[in-house]
Amino acid sequence: MTRQTLSGWGRTNPSLATVMNPANETDVAELLASTRGVIARGLGRSYGDPAQVSGGVVVDNRALGGISEISHDGVVSVGAGVSIDELLAMSIPQGWFVPVTPGTRQVTMGGAFAADVHGKNHHVDGSFAAHVRSLRIVTPTGTYDVSPERDADLFWASAGGMGLTGIITSLTLQMMPIETDQVLVDTERFANLEGVMQEMLSRDKDYRYSVAWVDCMTKGAHMGRAILTRGRHARASDLDEPTLKAPASPKLFIPFDAPSGLLNVASVRVFNEVWFRSAPKRQEREPQSLSSFFHPLDGVRDWNRLYGRRGFVQYQFCVDDAHANTVVEAISRLSSSGVASFLAVLKRFGAANPGPLSFPVPGWTLALDLPVGPRALPRVLDDLDSMVLEAGGRIYFAKDARLGPEKVRAMYPRLDEFLAVKHRVDPEGRLTSDLARRLNLEGS
Ligand SMILES: Cc1cc2nc3c(=O)[nH]c(=O)nc-3n(C[C@H](O)[C@H](O)[C@H](O)COP(=O)(O)OP(=O)(O)OC[C@H]3O[C@@H](n4cnc5c(N)ncnc54)[C@H](O)[C@@H]3O)c2cc1C
C-alpha cells in the first residue's frame, strides 16, 4: 500500500487529505479498521465533493484492478478500479458493450456503482446497478458479498450511496451483446421545447438510446429549441463492413485554460446558433462510432479547460411526468436570466430501482453546464432548487457541490432507510466525505 498527500493545498492546511492506494482487500480492511474519516475515490469524474474528505483518508481505488474472462453469456467480474474505458477496450472486440454508460468512459466500476450512474438508455434499461449481479464490499464491520438476493439492503443502499456504506473492491456485471462498433442514429431538429418533449414522450420507447440537446438561450416561440438524437446498436447486416474496434485514445486536447469569461451569454448564443443550424433537420440511420455517440467529450482531453480557471457548475435534476412543466419553467428561467448555459441535456428516465439514494425517478431529467462568473448564477440556482423541490424532484449527488441538508431530506425522502443500513455496517461513522458532511449523510 502506498501513501501520498494531496498536493497543492499547502503543508499546514488542516483540510489536507492523505491518499492511500491499497492494492487488495486485506489492505482496504486494515485501513478501515484503523482510520476514521475515509472515502473511496475513482477517477474523480464527479463534479462536486463526494470523493474527497478534508483532513481524512482518500482511498484511491485504481489499484483494485483485474478483469475476468467474459463468459459466453456476457458476465464479467471486474475490479472496482477498472474504468469503463479499460473494460470496453477488452470487451468490444469480443462483441460486448457495457449495459449503461455515462457521458464519459473515464469512470471506474466503483464510481459507477456508488453513483448508480445512468445513460441515454435509462428509459429502457435502468441505471448501472440494475446490471450488477453482485459485488464485494469492505465495510468497517466486515467484508461482504452482496447482491439483490443476498443482503439486498446493503446492495441497494450502496447503489447511489456515494461510497458511504463501504469500499467496493470488485463487482460482477452483465454485459450487453453487440454485433458492431456502430450505432444507427436518427437526428431531428425541433423549433421549441414543447415539440421535442412531445416527441420524446410519445416515441422514445421505440429507441434504446435517446438524448436531446436543448438551447437554453432562446426565448419566445423558439424557447428550448432542440436537437434530438436517438439510436440503436447497428447489427452486422446493417453495415457493409462491420467491425468491432476498441475506442481510440483522444487526438485533440486543450493545452491551456481558456480566459475566464470566454463562455459568456454572447459567445454561447453564437455557439448554440451554429450548433443548431449545423444539425440536420431530419436524418435517419446515420452510422456513428460508439465513442462519438456515447462519449463525445472523451475525444478532447482536458475539455474542461475551455471554461477557464473559474470553471463551471453542473446542475442536474429530475422530476416525474406530472411535473414536466418544471423542465419548461427551468429553461424559461435560464433563458431570461443572463446566465449562459453551455451544454443542456434532456433525457427520459424509466422505472426507479430500490436504492434509497439512487437518483433516477421515472420522468424527465435535465443536466446543465453553467460557466461560473455571472452575478446572477447563485440566485438562478436557488430558484431552480425551489422549482425542483416544489415539484417533488431531486438533484443528482454526483453533480452537486452546493445543496444544503434540509433540501436533501425533502428530495430524498428515504434517507433514513439509507442511514439505517449505513449505521449497521459503519456504526462508528468511519466512512465520510465532504459531500456527506455538507449534506448530513453521516447519520450522526
Ligand atoms: C463528462 C462527464 C459526463 C458525465 N455524464 C454522466 C451521465 O451521463 N450520467 C451519469 O450518471 N453520470 C455522469 N457523469 C458523472 C460520473 O459518471 C459519476 O460522477 C461517476 O460516479 C464518476 O466515477 P469515478 O470513478 O470518477 O468516481 P469518483 O468521482 O472518484 O467518485 C464518485 C463516488 O463514487 C465513490 N466511489 C468510487 N470508488 C468507489 C469504490 N471502490 N467503492 C465505493 N465507492 C466508491 C466515491 O466515494 C464517490 O462518492 C459524468 C461526468 C463527466 C465528467
Image (cartoon, grey):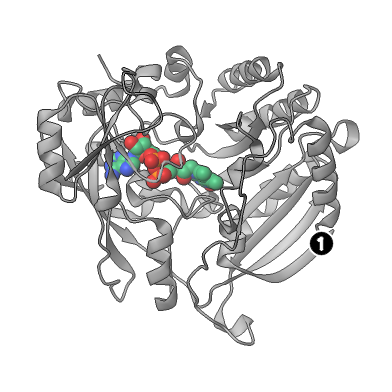
Residue 206 position by quadrant: bottom right
Q: Is residue 198 left or right of residue 319?
A: right
Quadrant where the C terminus lies? top left
Query: At 26% across and 42% down in the image, what residue appears?
Result: 155
* 423 with respect to 397 (left or right): left
Residue 79 versus residue 420 in the image, above or below? below
The answer to whether residue 304 of the structure is visible from this angle is: yes
- The x, y position of residue 242, in whole percent, is 57, 83
- Check disc 1: other Cα within 10 Å, few if <14, some if 14-19, many if 20+: few
For mark 1, give the secondary structure: strand
User: Residue at image x 62%, y 37%?
Assistant: 366
Residue indicated by mark 1: 282
Instruction: Residue 60: name its quadrant.
Output: top left
Ligand 1 sits in quadrant: top left
* Vertical side of 130 occupied by 184: above or below: below
Q: Residue furthest front?
A: 11
> Extreme bottom residue here?
240
| Residue 291 location (% of width, % of height) | 56, 63
**Camera-side residue of 205 and 359:** 359
User: Residue 403, image x and y in percent?
Assistant: 49, 19
Q: Residue furthest right?
A: 221
The kind of residue tagged 1 is Arg
Which quadrant: the N terminus?
Answer: top left
Between 227 and 25, the residue placed more toward the observer is: 25
- Dividing the picture into quadrants, the one containing residue 41 is top left
Is residue 352 in sight in this rendering?
Answer: no
